[in-house]
Image (cartoon, rainbow, N blue to C red):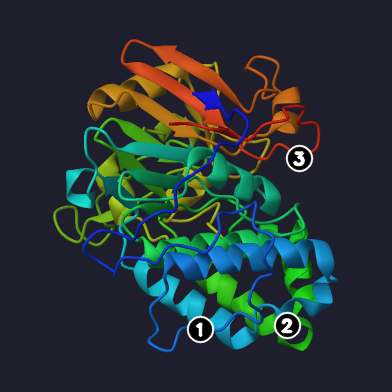
Amino acid sequence: MMSSPPAAATEPPSSDEGLLPAASTPTSKFPNSTHLPQIPITWPVDGSLTVSWIFNLIQAFDWASRAIPPSEFPSVLPVGVFDKLVLAASKILHKEPNCVQIDEKSGLMADSRVVVVGDVHGQLHDVLFLLTDAGFPSQDRFYVFNGDYVDRGAWGLEVFLLLLAWKVVMPHRVYLLRGNHESKYCTSVYGFEKEVYTKYGDNGKHVYRKCLGCFEGLPLASIIAGKVYTAHGGLFRGTIITPSKRSKKKNRKVVHNPEVTSLTLGNLEELGKARRSVLDPPWEGPNLIPGDVLWSDPSMSPGLAPNKERGIGLLWGPDCTEAFLKKFNLKLIIRSHEGPDARDKRPDLGGMDLGYTIDHTVESGKLITLFSAPDYPQFQVALVPYAI
């Protein structure tokens, strides 16, 4: 784990190997360029995005955040370009499994670096600093974003669209996981819906719906190099096979039982079969795994229990962390979901003042909570935390 040092010069990234043409080198390095961006942003004639296109997008978003009111955002990114970007990214995301494997088949090598990023909550300038500091995605630099791109911060739309652009250009180097805030409920309460309507006016409803549809396609978790499990909230319950009332031998059905006495730790096969394409992960019924993965929290008490504080998801203890790591031959769990304000209410666990904390240390490995939004309320760290 590390917090980022002062920004260093970064070489321009290259395109995803074997998937897209080599990207042209930007005329200047972000963020020191004095050139104004080319606006409005236009969609390439051939439909192929490049790293140069993304660098112009970065400069345009950064300039717009400082120079124009939010209501003029369509003059920077017309709704037609928004539509094409979201469509291109959604086609990729919806094809990915619930738990993406980042391994040799993805191009991961012994000397590759994988940067894991926690909640960013619409903090555009911190995301830009992070990308510059840790290094832009490249052939040997992978990124896993652990969800919560929107809400609370003023530039959730820009953050989400920028990451979608990276996903389109480098689909096997950039991985975007879903957070609990990538949902209809949270975005309608915590600011993203209002942000979209402010920026796109009469087209706000259309843009918001497109974003919600894209949220549904985001994978739930990842496994890096066969050893590191990442998910926004964390672990999840298992499914229980019960006989149907019609027959004790046939027509068996799978149910998720939320009762404390029947809670069991889930496995990766069950995670892979969960239905993630929902606007809001349900808190009751047969499809509880997505809600668990997005909303659950670690605890120092052993076992599994309903997460009564949140009203959805679970609490899991160190014994569950050990069981999950051991069963799947893992060494580390990286989750996010809790900022300093949440940890202030949970004195039994470590604080988040540094942007991360080790919650469980067990025989097979560790559980870490990572939070990457330094301008979040009560967050005192001046740097952008991320894990490599």
Residue 72: x and y, percent?
A: 80, 79
Q: Would you place residue 302 above or below residue 372 in this image?
A: above
Quarter of the image with the C terminus is top left
Front residue of 345/155: it is 155
Front residue of 75/218: it is 75
Q: Is the residue under label 1 in contact with that under label 2 (CB below 8 Å)?
A: no
Amino acid beneath label 3 = Asp
Q: Residue furthest right?
A: 69
Q: Would you place residue 358 above or below residue 248 in this image?
A: above
Q: Which mark is residue 375?
A: 3
Q: Which mark is residue 189?
A: none
Q: CA distance from mark 3 to mark 1?
A: 32 Å
Number of dots carrying numbers:
3
Q: Residue furthest left?
A: 249
Q: Nearer the viewer, mark 3 or mark 1?
A: 1
Q: Which mark is residue 43?
A: 1
Residue 300: x and y, percent?
A: 55, 16
Q: Which mark is residue 75?
A: 2
Q: Would residue 26 appear left or right of 365 to someone viewing this image?
A: right
Residue 196: x and y, percent?
A: 73, 72
Residue drawn at point x = 55 percent, y = 52 percent: 283
At mark 3, the secondary structure is loop
Amino acid beneath label 2 = Ser
Amino acid beneath label 1 = Trp
